[in-house]
Amino acid sequence: MDPSLTLNDPAGRALTVAGIDEAGRGPLAGAVVAAAVLLAPGQVLAGVRDSKQLSATQREALVERIHGSALDWSIGVATQTEIDALNILHATMLAMSRAFAGLRRRPDLVQIDGNRAPRLEGFTGTVQTVIGGDRSCPAISAASILAKVHRDQLMMELHAEYPAYGFDRHKGYPTAEHRAALLSLGPCPAHRRSFAPVRAVMDAAR
């Protein structure tokens, strides 16, 4: 933990912390998903760390631990339509705002992975942006896992609807397999038309 990230108020009282993180900024298809996880003062969940350092099986097992141990948690989603309308940065901020709004309890402190904070309606407490927070802040690590697992589930649903694209394997990321399917089939309704590789395929088909 970065020592500059104080988890106590000026009187020394330990703070409840909500961590917020997202999954799915880079893919060419599907929604961007954010999660907010509220932890008790000083709470650390065993095995929970940056979702990118865990296998899919490990992440799925940890979801139950987070659901059962956190004070509260919530998921926020911004659809591919909203991504195209707003751009990916603003859609990510929207998903984060929705995740925070879904919490039934308000934290003392909010920690957000990255260097930008969304608008948190009605929150008057402290907000910290933490670069690499998914590796250093327990609440953000937990949020990264929930966001990743939820988005993967959404991509499996898209795979059932559009199986030819291989969403079950690449989850919408621009792999060689995905790009080949995009060139061969053109975009489906789940694709982000504002993203350059998708737009290039659309332009070439005109």
Image (cartoon, rainbow, N blue to C red):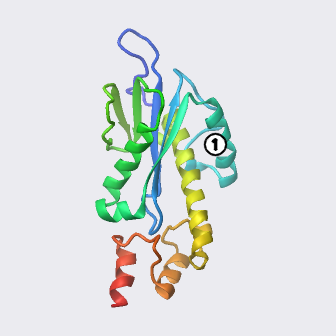
> Image point 32% across, 42% down: which residue?
118
**Position of residue 37 measured from the top left corner of the image (x, y, whole percent):** 51, 35
Q: Position of residue 191 (x, y in %)?
A: 44, 71
Please determine whether, in this image, residue 135 is positioned above or below residue 195. above
| Residue found at the very far top of the displayed protein | 11
Residue 1 seen in the figure: no
Q: Quadrant of residue 199?
A: bottom left
In the depicted structure, whether residue 58 falls above or below residue 13: below
Closer to us: 102 or 174: 102
Residue 180 picture location, percent across and down: 51, 83
Residue annotated with mark 1: 63
What residue is drawn where x is 58% and y is 41%?
49
**Depth check, front residue: 87 or 130:** 87
Q: Quadrant of residue 2?
A: top left
Amino acid marked by disc 1: Val
Question: The residue tagged with tag 1: helix, strand or loop?
Answer: helix
Left/right placement of residue 166 relative to residue 174 reads right
